[in-house]
Image (cartoon, rainbow, N blue to C red):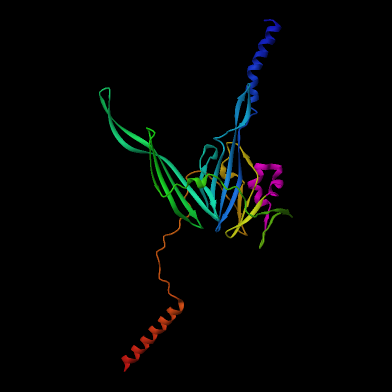
Amino acid sequence: MSMYKSFKISFLVLLLIFPLVSGETCEPYETYSITSILPSNGYVFIIVHHSEWICERVAGEQTLRRNVPDGEYNLYYLFNGSNLLFLGKSNPLLGEPSIVTEINGTFYILQRKQVVVPYKNITVTINGETRNITLTAKKTEMRVYRFDGCAFLIWNCTILEFQNGKEHAECNGTEILSYFTNTPQKRPSVVRGVIENGFMVFRLSNSTYKIPVTEFDRYVSGFFGSKTLNVLSTFHALPVGEGILIYYPGDVKVNGSVFISELPLMFFYDGKNLTHIKMYVGSVQEPPRCGNFSPRLTIPKSLIVLIGVFLMVILVYLGIKRHV
């Protein structure tokens, strides 16, 4: 084989291999960031936005692109200083309603669940053989709660979508999903922390909280490395329950091998201990429901005292009369 032909073959091999080699530099990733924190009666609603970047081959090379619309969605949580509840997820780019909305200072929560259920059994004959077939439907259950420190059910609706395209809906009251078309994007009045003498210091209106920087290191350094101190200096805090919620206002970038529970987005400090708040995505949890209180007769304390004195007088009188 001539040197020219050998070079030509080697060059063609390189052309075939090069896109594969260049593709190795493309690393998909995801980002999570807190976009809203909404206080309500000792609780806070927390909205976390997720974005996804995926690899795509363009002109023989792997390049990153944002996975729109599927990779863009919001996660909704409710926190009271001790428990974190996952309220659900929605993708506004796919036309899905928000989970939380605020109307005139009052918060409302939308709980939405979808399952496939059997609804009808039919018997058919195929090639002379009788078979029983179960038809299914997609069942969507929606409930809306008004939240004032506890959740009070104000609307519910069940929709069955059949395989032939027909729908059957049973709803309690007027359609109110239009309230959830816009997600509130705002943060309350918060305090930015400062690093002083090895402590993270948050000065709120009534209290000052000092937390050793080393308490954060094991959660933050693995994600930000040498930039850890710079990241910590951007942390914010606001009072929640018997302590403060501390959160990172920026994006946390992760790859597919990192669990969402590991993200250093939120912490809670009760004045003594720092707790890393572990987010998760799974089964939707219901908010704390308002109890069903039956009407009670309220008796003033003064009347109770008078009744007690009256009973004592009667007992004393009866005792005297018995000895007489």
- 196 or 203, nearer to the observer: 203
Answer whether residue 222 is magenta in the image.
Answer: yes
Q: Point out residue 220 in the picture as x, y percentages from the top left corner.
A: 65, 46
Quarter containing the N terminus? top right
Q: Is residue 71 above or below residue 15?
A: below
Q: Which residue is located at x 67 percent, y 50 percent?
A: 235
Q: Point out residue 133 in the picture as x, y percentages from the top left corner.
A: 31, 32
Main structural element of the magenta stretch: helix, strand or loop? helix
Q: Is residue 324 above or below residue 236?
A: below
Residue 52: name its quadrant: top right
Q: Is residue 252 visible?
A: yes
Q: Point out residue 31 in the picture as x, y percentages from the top left corner.
A: 61, 39
- 255 or 137, nearer to the observer: 137
Q: Which residue is located at x 68 percent, y 51 percent?
A: 214
Magenta segment: 209-234
Q: Point out residue 19 in the picture as x, y percentages from the top left corner.
A: 64, 21
Q: Image check: 299 left or right of 234?
A: left
Residue at the far right in the pictured view: 197
Quarter containing the C terminus? bottom left
Q: Is residue 198 visible?
A: no
Query: How many numbered marks, from 0 up?
Result: 0
Residue at the far top in the pictured view: 2
- 189 or 60, nearer to the observer: 189
Q: Is residue 149 above or below residue 132?
A: below
Answer whether residue 262 is magenta in the image.
Answer: no
Q: Image check: 134 left or right of 101?
A: left
Residue 29: name its quadrant: top right
